[in-house]
């Protein structure tokens, strides 16, 4: 496959800006073992493009090919925009390449546009051209609909967000290695966090550090004093010997067993020092509710991003999830239940359909890792546009 689409995309960004961003992401990935891995996953699009540009002789994989295609289409859209639209596009693009932001929202928007174009719709990038509150306008045989493309983090539905957990695990890792060197063995620290760690993430960086720092210090005091249990309203901590069903050859095998033992919602980390192993397993006092977080975002979007002048479609992208969680949300109908709950509410009056996808669909993974048809789709049966034959491919068909 030609690298021209990627070169065109980087040309829109600006080579100096692009490669400076890649260097910054590489530095961020090196900052903390677990957070570094999370950064690599979150910025997989940027890093994939960089990797392919650095090895032009290597043919992209199928997943990489999807990224190449979308990058090329984004560059093509930029060329077709008016000067005003290009300015808005450039502003969005450079915002996506700064700080903790990522290219995911733009690539999600491009994928949604491409899917509707393939269904026979004419797609206008109204969010760029006219600074509309919605991102896309689609038309087919005179019928029109508005589409909002939005990205929501699964952490919005977790009392103990993965981002906060990874930060805590990286902070305490050096202490655990030192402690294991003096106390060789296998240990398990189980934590229940009734108040979660969400308050820290929503506060300022300083408050976040204080929130995580308090829990970090409690664990250090437990270890220094050989205390097996510590409990208050914020956290219940218990340190026990780690009992394994069989010898584990590596951290990956150990984590797989722990995941089976503690379930998909538990947060896990493993610290190894010599022959010593220290496992931390944490969970909130209540179950994660990612689907409810999606419903709340749908309600907010319908009232602020849709004009109401045409049927509205909310195209959601669920970030910071994994294949196991995504499959549970689908197979257990959790996302479907919350989406249909939203569609029966007064806030859904301007919405004719809701869709949801993840990275699995964006890069074209097969079923069952990805949703059949490339997305989950839920229609609003009470919306008048449900009777529109022209809009039907955007509403009722997920293929």
Image (cartoon, helix red, strand yellow):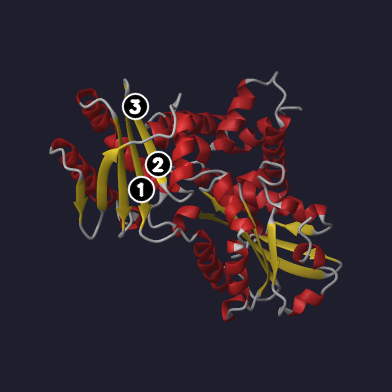
For the residues marked 1 and 3, what is the alpha-carbon distance in whole angstroms? 18 Å
For disc 2, the marked residue is 268
- Neighbours of disc 3 within 10 Å: few (<14), some (14-19), many (20+): some
Label 2 SS: strand
| Of 107 and 207, the residue lying toward us | 207
Q: Nearer the viewer, residue 90 or 115?
A: 115
User: Furthest residue to the front?
Assistant: 245
Q: Secondary structure at mark 1?
A: strand
**Residue positioned 72% across, 53% down in the render:** 113
Circle nearer the N terminus (1, 3): 3
The x, y position of residue 282, in whole percent, is 35, 48
Please tell me in which quadrant of the rendered image residue 35 appears. top left
- Secondary structure beneath disc 3? strand
x, y percent for residue 38: 46, 38
10 Å crowding of disc 2: few (<14), some (14-19), many (20+): many
Residue highlighted by disc 1: 282
Which residue occupies 20% across, 43% down? 228
Rendered location of residue 396, percent (x, y): 77, 66
Task: Give the residue displayed 45% in from the left and 58% down from the top.
Answer: 288
Q: CA distance from mark 3 to mark 2?
A: 13 Å
In the orientation shown, which residue stands out farthest toward the left? 225
Residue 234 location, x and y as percent? 25, 57
Q: CA distance from mark 1 to mark 2?
A: 7 Å
**Eyeballing the image, is 50 above or below 123?**
above
User: Which disc is residue 272 wearing?
Assistant: 3
1 or 2: tag closer to the N-terminus: 2
């Amino acid at each position: 496959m030609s690298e021209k689409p990627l070169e065109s995309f980087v040309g829109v960004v600006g080579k100096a800006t692009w490669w400076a961003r890649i260097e910054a992401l590489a530095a961020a990935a090196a900052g903390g073992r677990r957070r570094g891995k999370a950064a690599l996953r979150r910025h997989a699009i940027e890093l994939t493009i960089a990797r392919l540009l650095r090895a032009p002789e290597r043919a992209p994989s199928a997943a990489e090919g999807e990224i190449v295609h979308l990058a090329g289409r984004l560059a093509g859209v930029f060329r077709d925009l008016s000067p005003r639209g290009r300015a808005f596009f450039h502003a969005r693009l450079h915002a996506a390449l700064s700080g903790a932001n990522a290219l995911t929202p733009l690539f999600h928007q491009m994928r949604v546009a491409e899917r509707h174009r393939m269904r026979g719709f004419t797609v206008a990038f109204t969010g760029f051209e006219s600074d509309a509150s919605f991102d896309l306008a689609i038309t087919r045989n005179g019928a029109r609909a508005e589409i909002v493309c939005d990205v929501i983090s699964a952490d919005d539905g977790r009392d103990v967000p993965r981002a906060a957990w990874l930060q805590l695990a990286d902070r305490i890792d050096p202490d655990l290695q030192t402690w294991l060197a003096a106390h060789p063995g296998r240990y398990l620290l189980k934590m229940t966090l009734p108040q979660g760690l969400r308050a820290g993430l929503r506060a300022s960086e300083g408050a976040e550090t204080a929130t995580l720092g308090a829990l970090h210090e409690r664990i250090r005091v437990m270890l220094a004093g050989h205390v097996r249990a510590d409990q208050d309203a914020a956290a219940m901590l218990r340190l026990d010997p780690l009992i394994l069903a069989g010898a584990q050859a590596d951290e990956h095998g150990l984590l797989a067993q722990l995941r089976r033992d503690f379930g998909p919602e538990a947060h896990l980390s493993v610290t190894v020092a010599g022959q010593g192993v220290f496992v931390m397993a944490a969970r909130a006092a209540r179950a994660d509710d990612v689907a409810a977080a999606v419903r709340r975002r749908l309600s907010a979007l319908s009232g602020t991003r849709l004009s109401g002048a045409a049927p509205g479609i909310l195209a959601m992208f669920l970030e910071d999830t994994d294949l196991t969680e995504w499959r549970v949300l689908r197979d257990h109908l959790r996302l479907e239940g919350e989406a249909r709950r939203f569609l029966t509410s007064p806030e859904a009056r301007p919405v004719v359909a809701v869709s949801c996808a993840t990275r699995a669909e964006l890069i074209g993974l097969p079923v069952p890792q990805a949703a059949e048809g490339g997305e989950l789709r839920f229609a609003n049966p009470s919306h008048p546009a449900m009777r529109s034959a022209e809009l039907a491919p955007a509403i009722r068909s997920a293929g």
